[in-house]
Image (tube, helix red, strand yellow):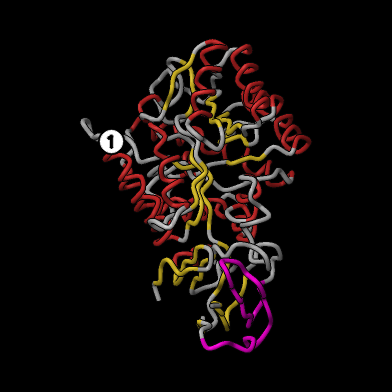
Amino acid sequence: MRLILTNCNVIDCVNPEPKSNATVVIEDSRIVDIRDGSSPASASDDQIIDLAGSYLLPGLWDCHVHPQHPVPEGTTVAQITADFGQNLQRGMVESGVTAVRSGGANNWIDVAWRKAFEGPGPDGPRVFACGSFLTTTGGHFLTSGHARECDGPYGYAEAIRDQMKHDVDHIKLNLSGGIMGPRWDRHTESFLLPEELETAFALCRQRNFPVMAHATNPYSVKMAIKLGARSVEHAYIMDEDCVTDFVSSGTWYVPTLAISQLSPNLATTEHEKAYAARKQLAPDLVVRADAAAEEHRRSFQKALSAGVKMALGSDISPMKDSALLELGLWVKCGATAFQALVAATKNAAEMCGVGPELGTVEPGKLADLIVVGGNPLADIENLRKLELVLKEGRIVADHR
């Protein structure tokens, strides 16, 4: 049986102009045809849906997610696991996030949900898992519950091998501090010794595991790129050499604007203000975010202007808000709506190594798609007018 979606505007995330009055034909989980005008001759068992001029585009990706934190004292691993799965499912059915990349999750619960969503069981987004993120003793974001503290070259080697044994997709290394943390956890400071860095990256290269590198200042960013990181997360502070290194190496950049741009003082839209009010950041963290915000915006804008390869990741929860808020921040900080959409679809899939299968609306691709009621190229907030979510050609959410 084929699913035929007619009378839609297709934003394929390859070309900046939508295809108007288009028909998309899906069979055996894949897009088999995209045509102008009327639908093809149909068989009796074909399902035909008239989308009445709505906009069809690839499912969204969030390439930097964690389970929600902090969790109440006494919360069990079982409850954290269940909550994370429900959070991921809500992101897919309520916001159209059809794939995520984990930036750290305790007890390999991201691996567990990846496997659960791969099979014929519950519907959820595709998950690219890393297990715990690796940091030093006294390192970054220990309060999250997702950190694994390591020291010395062999400490990192043992931890990385253990992550691989538990079937992760990539290794997350925290090379530096962050905006959110105690007073000794600062994004201006780097944490790993040269011999720790070299051993960790060498082992990942040897075993062909991509490195997701949390790097927040020029030294850590340049070291991550030099040693072969697949992606650099955050890069709140970048000098010109960082940008040059990004471009020459082809390393991906995931800017996570939400970390510095969503304080109560900086939130401007209705949705941003609602998120900031719910988040209730501690006053000292608000001060730190506000102090870092302008430099982070400049780093993002420099990378955007230079043509650095960039993908979208939010680093916030809940999933029903995360990608949509981050997309809005991309546009507010200087990206076009098309650049933001490409970062959240085509680029995200390519960064995760599945570009030939996902991330665009093209014949041959798996049909992970969303339909929205307004043109997101005219206003990125139109992504909130979600009508349909499809995973491999199956309708998993219908909000019409």
Instruction: Answer whether residue 33 is magenta in the image.
Output: yes
Q: Of 151 and 327, which appears nearest the observer?
A: 151
265 left or right of 60? left
Identify the residue at image location x=64%, y=26%. 218
Q: Specify start and end residues of the magenta stretch as a single range.
A: 18-44
In terms of secondary structure, where does tag 1 sit? loop
Q: Which x, y percent locates residue 167? A: 50, 35
Q: Of 156 and 340, which appears nearest the observer?
A: 156
Q: Which x, y percent locates residue 126? A: 50, 51
Q: Which x, y percent locates residue 184? A: 43, 17
136 left or right of 68? right
Residue at the right extreme, as displayed: 248
Identify the residue at image location x=51%, y=33%. 292
Image label count? 1
Q: Quadrant of residue 336?
A: bottom right
390 left or right of 358? left
Q: What is the three-letter code of the residue carrying label 1?
A: Val
Image quadrant containing the C terminus: bottom left
* Residue wearing tag 1: 71
Q: Which x, y percent locates residue 267? A: 42, 49
67 left or right of 314? left
Instruction: Answer whether residue 280 is magenta in the image.
Output: no
Identify the residue at image location x=60%, y=62%. 366
Identify the residue at image location x=67%, y=75%. 33
